[in-house]
Image (cartoon, helix red, strand yellow):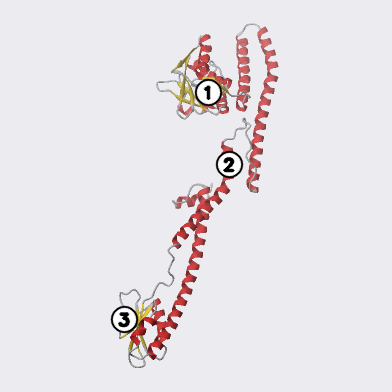
Amino acid sequence: MTEPAADKAGRHFAFWPGTLRARLFLILFSGLAIAYGLSFSILFFERYTSAKAVMLGTLESDLATSIAVIDRLPAAERPAWLDRLSRGNYRLELGTGVPGVPDMSGRGAEIAARIEDAAGQKFPLTVQAIPGENGRLQGHLTLSDGSPLTIDVTPRGVMPLASWLPYVFAVQMLLLVLCTWLVVRQAFRPLGDLAAAADALDPNARGKPISETGPREVAHAARAFNAMRDRIAHHLEERVQILAAISHDLQTPIARMRLRVDMADESPERDKLVSDLREIEMLVKDGIAYARSSHGNGEKTSRIDLSSFVDSIAYDYQDTGKAVMVIGPVNGTISTKPHALRRILTNAIDNAIKFAGAAELAVERRAAGEIVLTVLDRGPGIPDEKLEAAMQPFVRVEQSRNRDTGGTGLGLAIAQQLATTLGGNVRLYNRSGGGLAVEITLR
C-alpha cells in the first residue's frame, strides 16, 4: 500500500504538524506572511531608490549653488558664509582638509560622482574617503582665486525608519495570525462537529441530528451523516423485529416437540432430546435479549439508592441458597435505568456462581463522579489473551464453558450492550490469586 506523500514529508520535517488543522494553518500563514514580506520589501526598495535619487539630486544642486556662491564672495567674507551654505549631509571648509584615500566603492562612488558633477568642469576636484569614518568623504578643489576649499560629506541614512513602524509591523503580523486562525477554525469547525457526532453515534438513542447548515459541501456531508444514522437505526430495528418473529415462530414447533418428547418412553435418547430442546429455548431467549439490549428497552431513568439496590440483588440470590455477598460500604444514590442495571449485575453474578460457586459484589464511588460496581469470584478465570473475545456474542471460552455448564455465550455481551445504553462500559480482568472480576463503570 502506497504511503501518502504528506506522511512521507512529515517524517522528513520534524516541525510538520500532525493535524490537518495545524497543517492548513501553517500553510496559509506561511503563504500570507511570505506575500506580505515580499510586498513590504518591494515597497521598501522602491522608497529606498526614490529617496536615494532625491538625496543625490539635492546634494548635487545644493553643492553646485554653494560652490558658486563661495567662489564669487570676497575672501574676507567667505568664513562667515560657510555655515549658511553648509547642509545636514555636507559642510564647507576653507583649507586642504584631512588626508584620505582614493579607494571608494558602492554608495561612496555614487556620491563622489555627484560631487564631481556639482563642481563641474570649472573646478578640478579630487574626492577621497576618510578611513574609519563610516563612509565619510572629502572633496578637495581650488577656487578661482587659488584658495583651497574642502567639501566634507557625511552620508546619512537614505530612508530613516519611524520609531512606530516596528509596532505597526508587529500588530499587522498579529492580525495576520488571528485572521488565519479564524479562517481555519471556521473551515474545520463543521468537520470537528461531524467527527464528534461520529464518535458519539448511538442509533439506540434518538438524539438530535447534527446541523445541516453551512457551506454546500459541509451541509451535504451533514445530511449524508444524518441519513446514515437513520439507516443504521432502521437496520437495528429490523434486526429486532426479525429475531422477535423467529422467536415467535420457533416457540410453536418447540412446544410440539417438547410435548412429543414428554409423551415418549424413558430412554437415553429422550433425555438427550430434552437437553437439546432446553438449549434451543435458551439460545432463542438469549438471542432476543441480546438484540433488544443493543437497541434499548425504552426504560426511563430514575434515581435509586445504591445500598438498597445492591442489597436486594444479594438477598434474592441468598433466598435461593446462592452464596452472594456484598463487600465494603455502599452509600449514595445514582440516576440510571434500574432494570437494565439489574440485568447487567445478574448476568455477571450468574457467571460467577456457575464457574466459581459464589460471588462478591463491591461498589466504589470515584472522584471523577464514576460509580464502579464489581462482581468478583474465585473461579478458574479466563486466559488473558481471551478476555477481549469473551465479551463478544456467542463466544464461549473452552477452559471454563462447556455443554455441562450450559450457556450461549451471550451473558457478558448483553451486559456490555446494556452498559453502553447506560453510558458506561464493562471490563474483565483476572484477580491476583485467581478468579475473575467483572467491572461495570457508570458515568
Q: From the top left corner, tell me how far across and down residue 277 is, in percent.
A: 63, 15
**Left or right position of 44 against 264:** left
> Does dot 3 land on a helix, a strand or a loop?
loop
Q: Residue at x 63, y 17 (%)?
A: 281
Q: In the orientation shown, which residue stands out farthest toward the top?
A: 265
Foreground of the two, 4 or 165: 165
How many marks do you count on the picture? 3
In the picture of the structure, the residue carrying the numbered disc 1 is 334
Amino acid type, mark 1: Ile
Q: Which of the two discs, 3 and 2, labels the residue nearer the N terminus? A: 3
| Disc number for residue 351 | none
Q: Residue at x 31, y 78 (%)?
A: 130
Q: From the top left corner, tell me how far across and down residue 264 is, in percent.
A: 66, 7
The CA span between labels 3 and 2 is 74 Å
> Does dot 1 land on a helix, a strand or a loop?
strand
Q: From the top left corner, tell me how far across and down residue 65 is, in percent.
A: 43, 85
> Does dot 2 land on a helix, a strand or a loop?
helix
The CA span between labels 1 and 2 is 30 Å
Label 2: few (<14), some (14–19) or many (≥20) C-alpha neighbours in 10 Å: some
Residue 240 visible (yes or no): yes
In the picture of the structure, the residue carrying the numbered disc 2 is 193
Amino acid type, mark 2: Asp
Q: Residue at x 54, y 50 (%)?
A: 182
In the picture of the structure, the residue carrying the numbered disc 3 is 101
Q: Which of the two discs, 1 and 2, labels the residue nearer the N terminus? A: 2
Amino acid type, mark 3: Val
Q: From the top left corner, tell me how far across and down residue 15 is, in percent.
A: 45, 51
Q: Which of the two discs, 1 and 3, labels the residue nearer the N terminus? A: 3
The CA span between labels 1 and 3 is 95 Å
Q: Is the residue 162 above or below the residue 202 in the image?
A: below
Foreground of the two, 273 or 246: 246
